[in-house]
Image: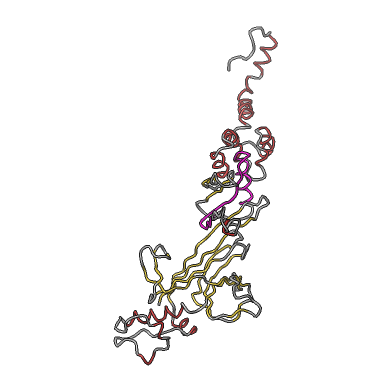
Amino acid sequence: MASLLPNSSGLFERALEKSYADRWDAYAGAVAAIRTAKLVSPPPSFLPYLVFEYGLGELTPYVPNLYTLITDKEGVRWQRVRGTPAAVSRGLAWLDYTATLEEAWHGRAYWNSFQLRFPSLPLADHPDLERIEGVTTLSVPMRSQLRRGVFQYDATALVGDNSRLDDSMLERESGVAVTQQGTLWSFGRTTEIDHVLTEAEGTAIGNWIEVPEDAGLKWADMKYPWTTATFPWGANAATQRRALMAAWFATRTFYATLRDDAGNAIGHRRCRAIHPVVQQFGGNYSVGGTGYQAITGGTRVYIEAMTDFENADAVTATSVELTVGAARVGGIKPGKLWLQPGELLGGQAIAVTPVSLPLRATVREQLKFLMRF
């Protein structure tokens, strides 16, 4: 290679340079490594110093992989847009999340707040929510405050100012606080179960009619109240059978029972909707993308239960079933919707279905059953 010495160098200096000529190739790699040590695959021992150098220390409690901040100068790029929605998007991307930022209405007292609407359910409450909260808070302007995170279940506040409803529970929005900063998290998840009632299940609960022959249903075999016979006796016998069996469900109380992998009950949630339905586009209820409308004489039954926030946490439900004919233990208030194991006695289980639901304090589980006959 060409000499690196100045023209004023002496004979000794030039001779010394020539003596190292065979080592330039070995030095070339070291020189390149020194130049790129901070930029290309820095060793783990460098990371604390690089984070300090770039002024990113406040992010370290929330970003699990510090390489994320250093690679391609992601942390520096975040600093350049800090205080804007772009910084929130970039910060959430470090945690493998995306969300839409929705600011509060300017007329509210909490006008400087905003919420994050997620396109999918965050994987876990801890530590994910703390990380999301921390990165987002550092990304927005000082005057902005993260108020809430939402996915699927979103009950907004009713504005009752200057009325008797002012400062009532209707002015509270859905969600529960599980982090130190008090951010509300309002998540929902839906599980749909399409079940055909078996003869064994129907016989056990006392609601079974044999599939009629060509002659149709016999009057002598009818054990159902006349008020449930809301169809013409000249109607198709199979339709009559399904309508009678569906009407039986509407007069009973059902609980959705969640069980763990050992078969033990996690809890029982009282069903809030039990209606005979017919398939109808744009109906009030939906299962599997198909609409159903509640109607007298319906030939199927729609049953729904929804757990509340903090009903169960840090446990996985491996099966769900409908419990029919159970009774509360003495002393349990009739209005209690979530019953702990041991607070419900007896009953017959039907529509037992394997599931995998990691129950969390921030997630309301919506359980939909479509019962066919």
Q: Specify whether residue 27 is painted magenta.
A: no
Query: At 66% across and 7% down in the image, what residue appears?
Result: 8
Image quadrant holding the N terminus, namely: top right
Residue 243 lies, in percent from the top left, at 38, 79
Q: Residue at x 52, y 73 (%)?
A: 321
Q: Does residue 290 appear to the left or right of 84 in the view shown?
A: left
- Near-viewer residue (339 or 13): 339
Tell me, yes or no, whether the highlighted magenta stretch contains residue 145: yes
Which range is magenta? 129-156
Up the image or down, 27 lies above or below 43; here it is: above
In the rendered structure, the answer to whether residue 239 lies left or right of residue 338 reads left
Q: Is residue 142 above or below residue 15?
A: below
Q: Residue at x 64, y 50 (%)?
A: 130
For the point 41% across and 70% down, the residue is: 294
Q: Position of residue 45 (x, y in %)?
A: 69, 38
Task: Name the spot of residue 167 as percent of width and height, x first.
Answer: 61, 56
Q: Note whether residue 140 is visible.
A: yes
Residue 232, by quadrant, is bottom left
> Is 274 placed left or right of 27 in the picture?
left
* Rendered location of residue 50, percent (x, y): 66, 34
Q: How is the image coloured?
A: secondary structure
Q: Is residue 293 left or right of residue 260?
A: left
Whether residue 287 is visible: no
Quadrant location of the C terminus? bottom left
